[in-house]
Image (cartoon, rainbow, N blue to C red):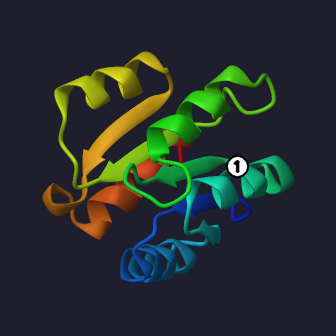
């Protein structure tokens, strides 16, 4: 596996970030975290991650707003995004899937090893 793939985890739950970060790093990924939507947009602009794990319910700017902004910009529209949330809402799922190159996972339904597998699939590793 190419060791230099950068993953940005965007989630306001520190424990979620810690657990997923640890597993991704063991798999050889470079990992950074943002704990709110505004911080996420700044880090994406600066670091250009290869993939983003994005929660929906967050302070300052929610995940759907972050997703829409990223998909509108030429420099970020092709970054694969996996929405990782406990919120299941048919309208939000539809919004996410319309954005393209995006997947929607419910945290409680997917163990960390499954999330890592999906990351690898999205990055074609």
The residue to which callout 1 is attached is: 41
Residue 1 can be seen in this image: no
Vertical order, 14 against 56 (above or below): below
Question: Quick one: quadrant of the N terminus?
Answer: bottom right
- Name the residue furthest front: 60
Q: How crowded is mark 1: few (under 14 residues within 10 Å), some or many (20 or more)?
A: some
Above or below for 72 versus 122: above
The answer to which of 16 and 1 lies nearer the viewer is 16
Identity of the residue drawn at 70% across and 49% down:
41
Residue at 65% x, 33% y is: 70
Q: Residue at x 53, y 48 (%)?
A: 125
Residue 120 horizontal/vertical position (percent): 47, 51
Left or right relative to 38: residue 59 = left
- Outermost left residue: 109
Q: Is residue 31 depicted above or below 93 in this figure?
A: below
User: Which residue sits furthest top?
Assistant: 98
Q: How many marks?
A: 1
Position in image of residue 12 (x %, y %):
45, 69
Q: What residue is drawn where x is 47% and y is 47%?
A: 62
Residue 71 shows in the view:
yes
Instruction: Residue 111 in the image: state x and y as whole percent.
Output: 22, 66
| Residue 70 horizontal side relative to residue 36, left or right | right
Residue 35: % across, % down = 55, 69
Q: What element carries label 1?
A: helix
């Amino acid at each position: 596996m190419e060791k230099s793939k950068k993953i940005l985890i965007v989630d306001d739950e520190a424990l979620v970030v810690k657990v997923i970060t640890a597993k991704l790093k063991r798999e050889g990924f470079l990992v950074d975290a943002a704990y709110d939507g505004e911080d996420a947009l700044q880090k994406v602009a600066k670091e250009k991650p290869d993939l983003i794990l994005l929660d929906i319910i967050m302070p300052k700017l929610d995940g759907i707003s972050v997703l829409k902004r990223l998909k509108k910009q030429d420099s970020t529209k092709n970054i694969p995004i996996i929405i990782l949330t406990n919120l299941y809402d048919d309208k939000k799922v539809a919004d996410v899937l319309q954005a393209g190159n995006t997947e929607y996972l419910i945290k409680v339904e997917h163990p960390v090893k499954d999330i890592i597998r999906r990351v690898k699939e999205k990055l074609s590793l």
